[in-house]
Amino acid sequence: MKLFIASDLHGSVIATQAMLTRFEQSGAQYLILLGDMLNHGPRNAIPDGYNPTALAETLNQYADKIIAVRGNCDSEVDQMLLQFPITASFAQVLMPQMRLFLTHGHIYNPDNLPPLQAGDALVYGHTHIAVAEYRDDILLFNPGSTTIPRNGARASYGLITDTECQVRAIDNDELLLSCPIRHTR
């Protein structure tokens, strides 16, 4: 199974269309969105291509492939525009070799882990900083941000397969980070 992971779209149709092109090229079965989809949030500048209504219409074309969680900038009003659920603060995906705990990152994060077993993964966004590493026996994975990367990073997305997790640049698909999947079970 291959999962495509993106976070922090923040209302940018331009950045999201570039991300969706990569999704279509990836061959991934599902598009996991880790929150902060339609709104830029009060701490962020308005991004290029900011159009929450058009972004909702664009994402709705992929509704049957999306697994999403709510970010701190997402609201119940946003849910009215979207044809896939976004109001859960977390979701879980079971893969043969691990459980993925999906969350935005403002509640559960590396400093406040949910109950996880050795071999599980915390998959989160919120910080706009890509991470692909193990802390003890827990995989910490953040795909970065499609729209507002921090610390001089590039806009990015993530892939998780049965053997590896990757963070890749949206502009040229360059591999930015990689981490093997440990089979601890």
Image (tube, rainbow, N blue to C red):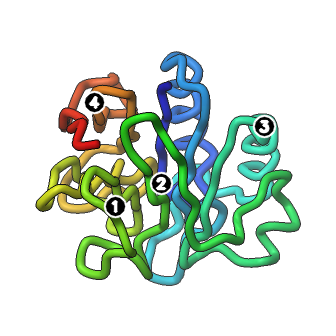
Query: Tag 2, which secondary structure?
Result: loop
Q: Earlier in the sequence, mark 3 or mark 1?
A: 3
Query: Tag 1, which secondary structure?
Result: loop
Q: Is 134 above or below relative to 169?
A: below
Along the line of sight, the residue nearer the viewer: 155 or 177: 177
**Distance of label 3 from label 4 (alpha carbons):** 25 Å
**Distance of label 1 from label 2 (alpha carbons):** 8 Å
Look at label 1 and name its amino acid: His
| Foreground tag (3 vs 1) | 3
**In this figure, which residue is indicated by the disc labeled 4?**
164
Q: Is 60 above or below relative to 90?
A: above
Task: Give the numbered dot on residue 47.
Answer: none
Q: Is 159 above or below relative to 184?
A: above
Q: Quadrant of residue 110?
A: bottom left
Location of residue 63 in the rendering, given as x and y in whole percent from the top left corner: 78, 42
Location of residue 144 in the rendering, given as x and y in whole percent from the top left corner: 34, 52
The answer to the question of whether label 1 and label 2 lie on touching residues, with beta carbons closer than 8 A, is yes
Local crowd at mark 2 within 10 Å, few (<14), some, or many (≥20)? many
Q: Earlier in the sequence, mark 1 or mark 4?
A: 1
Name which residue lies at 40% across and 40% down: 157
Task: Give the numbered dot on residue 7.
Answer: 2
**Distance of label 2 from label 4 (alpha carbons):** 19 Å
**Distance of label 1 from label 4 (alpha carbons):** 21 Å
Look at label 3 and name its amino acid: Asp
**In this figure, which residue is indicated by the disc labeled 1?**
128
Name which residue lies at 82% across and 46% down: 57
Q: Quadrant of the C terminus?
A: top left
Name which residue lies at 23% across and 27% down: 175
Look at label 2 and name its amino acid: Ser
Q: Earlier in the sequence, mark 3 or mark 2?
A: 2
Q: Is residue 19 left or right of residue 83?
A: left
